[in-house]
Image (cartoon, grey):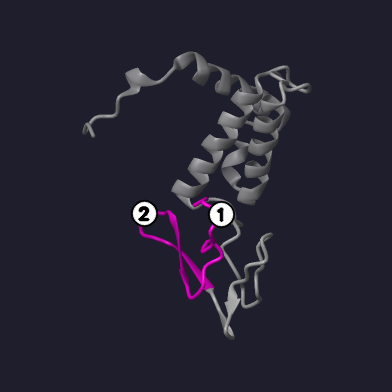
Amino acid sequence: MSAKTRFDLIPFAAVGEIADVLAYGAEKYSANNWCRGTEWGRYFSALCRHIFAWWRGEDRDPETGLSHLAHAGCCLLFLMEYQRNAWGTDDRFCGPDGQAFTKHDGRSTQQDGTTGQSACWVGSDGLQQCATTGPSIYDDDDGLD
């Protein structure tokens, strides 16, 4: 990877649409209000709603008239900044909390009286890391990672 950031590779028209979403939010709430942080799940949910609306064929958000993809891009940028700066509350599901967790296929994290435990922490780089000990909820044969 190059030592210098290649800003010349960024599609500026798309970035402009995301900036339009930010301007709408600044008018409605206040400029940079999102920097105060919130539960990460709030913006993950909004990102999913915009992506799914776009996937169903709705190109523009009915409230703003702006692109659903630009709204999703905005949410993604917020989440990237939350993670990078450790802002808000990381409320991602990290695994069992001492209770058996059963997937839809019936496989459980509890086997032979042991419970798989997930430990999560924020590393020195500001990124969340998780490790699972014991049986994993992902150890199945569905072919998906």
User: Considering only vertical position in the picture, is 95 above or below 111?
Assistant: above
Amino acid at circle 1: Asp
Task: Give SS at disc 1.
Answer: loop
Residue 25 seen from this side: yes
User: Considering only vertical position in the picture, is 134 above or below 13?
Assistant: below
Residue 59 horizontal side relative to residue 92, left or right: right
Task: Give SS at disc 2.
Answer: loop
Q: Residue 132 appears at what percent x and percent y?
A: 47, 69
Q: Residue 21 appears at what percent x and percent y?
A: 63, 24
Residue at 63% in and 38% down = 33
Residue closer to the observer: 70 or 106: 106
- Sequence-wise, the earlier of marks 1 and 2 is 2
Judge the density around disc 1: few (<14), some (14-19), many (≥20) Cα neighbours within 10 Å. few
- Image marks 1 and 2: residues in contact by CB distance under 8 Å: no
Amino acid at circle 2: Asp
Q: Residue 68 appears at what percent x and percent y?
A: 66, 24
Using the rendered view, name the quadrant where residue 52 is placed.
top right
Judge the density around disc 2: few (<14), some (14-19), many (≥20) Cα neighbours within 10 Å. few
Q: Residue 125 appears at what percent x and percent y?
A: 36, 54
The residue where tag 2 is placed is: 125
Quadrant holding the N terminus: top left
Nearest to the eye among marks 1 and 2: give it.
Answer: 1
The residue where tag 1 is placed is: 142
Please report the bounds of the magenta region as a residue range.
Answer: 117-145
Q: Is residue 138 magenta?
A: yes
Q: Hey, which residue is sitting farthest left in the picture?
A: 3
Residue 38 seen from this side: no
